[in-house]
Image (tube, grey):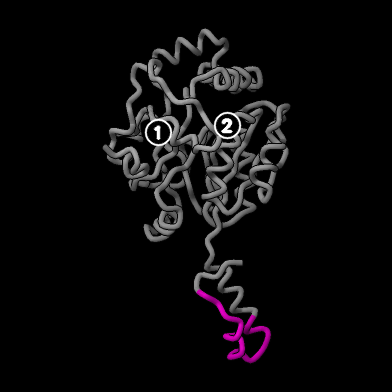
Amino acid sequence: MEFPVPFNLSYCKTYDNNSEIQSLFMQLEEIKITRTVISHFYNEEYLLPWWLMHHTKIFDHGILINRGSTDRSVEICKLFAPHWEVRDSRFLEFDPTNTDIEVMEIEREVSGWKMVLNTTEFLCCNNVEEFFSSLHTLGQNMYAIRMIVMIDKHDYNYSKLRYSIPLVEQRYHGLFPYKPEIGCAWRFIHNHLDGAYLPGRHFSRHQPIVYNSPSFIFKFYFSPWNEHTKARKLQITPTLSKKGIRMGLQKHYGQSSEELETLFLYLSNSTQDLRNHPEYQQLFPKFKP
């Protein structure tokens, strides 16, 4: 247990009995804010090392839900986050409704701040302690954290990717959410019993407010654009439930490498160099001109 102030056991001598001492410890425990991230994964051995190294620095606890992976994903979770939980999903098909039912059941098991992220989604903030403190200070129970959709620039000469460098510092092209309400470009963080999500988790029956300080979700959508990312997208389509297919999710993940490449080139024409944006520069001062 961590104490918010230097703590000396000699202080306990002023208390008359063990019950008073126990009460003090319980109060100190309540002061500590818990932070839990919940995430489904399916064959994510490529992104997981970056994702886990990034989020174990932000969240106290993680609950990782394995949707039938056949690669080294589970092994990587246990290696990079040995203190986090790995569970098997009840659902092997990818169905947005069932996915969100499952995460909300898990949310109800934990208290404190909760966030549900995909493996492609990285929460970024300047100072972790100040970020969580601000959630409390602003006095709301649910916040929408704006999302930057990462899309590589097709003719840009990127450096070779390294696991020793955070992924969020190796890619810097994407779509900035100037009007996040268009397309609901956000993810939620909250301290409700559960998130009361609608399928896809871009809407909630609660009343979130948009968190406007420079903190973002970096969603690696068509980035880093390479064979690993193509394979990751293409493996998802065959696992879609009938409902997922009716919702048209196969368009998001693609049905052939050629189809994905065509979509990437189209989207790449709209991508922006985020290093020119003031809020991005606040997150990554080294990119300031």
Nearer the observer, 220 or 67: 220
Nearer the observer, 248 or 228: 228
- SS of the residue under disc 1: strand
Residue drawn 67% across and 51% down?
83
Decide: few, some or many residues near mark 1? Use Cα within 10 Å; few <14, some 14-19, many ≥20. Answer: many
What span is colored magenta in the figure?
A: 6-21
Q: Is residue 220 highlighted in magenta?
A: no
- SS of the residue under disc 2: loop
Check whether the beta carbons of the residues at disc 2 and disc 1 lie within 8 A of each other.
no
Decide: few, some or many residues near mark 2? Use Cα within 10 Å; few <14, some 14-19, many ≥20. Answer: some
Q: Amino acid at mark 2?
A: Leu
Q: Name the quarter where the C terminus is drawn.
A: top left
The residue indicated by pointer 2 is 47
Q: Is residue 158 above or below residue 112?
A: above
Q: Is residue 153 left or right of residue 2?
A: left
Q: Is residue 19 highlighted in magenta?
A: yes
Residue drawn 36% across and 28% down?
175
Q: Amino acid at mark 1?
A: Ile
Real-space CA distance between mark 2 and mark 1, rounded to the nearest whole angstrom: 17 Å
Nearer the observer, 176 or 135: 176
Residue drawn 54% across and 15% down?
254
Q: Is residue 252 above or below residue 105?
A: above
Estimate the x, y position of residue 85 in percent, counting from the top left.
68, 47
The reply to whether residue 78 is visible in this rendering is yes
Estimate the x, y position of residue 275 in percent, counting from the top left.
32, 33
The residue indicated by pointer 1 is 148
Q: Residue furthest top?
A: 258
The reply to whether residue 210 is visible in this rendering is no
Residue drawn 50% across and 37% down?
165
Kindly report which numbered mark, 2 or 1, lies closer to the viewer in this rendering: 2
Disc on the earlier residue, 2 or 1: 2
Estimate the x, y position of residue 238 in percent, counting from the top left.
65, 17
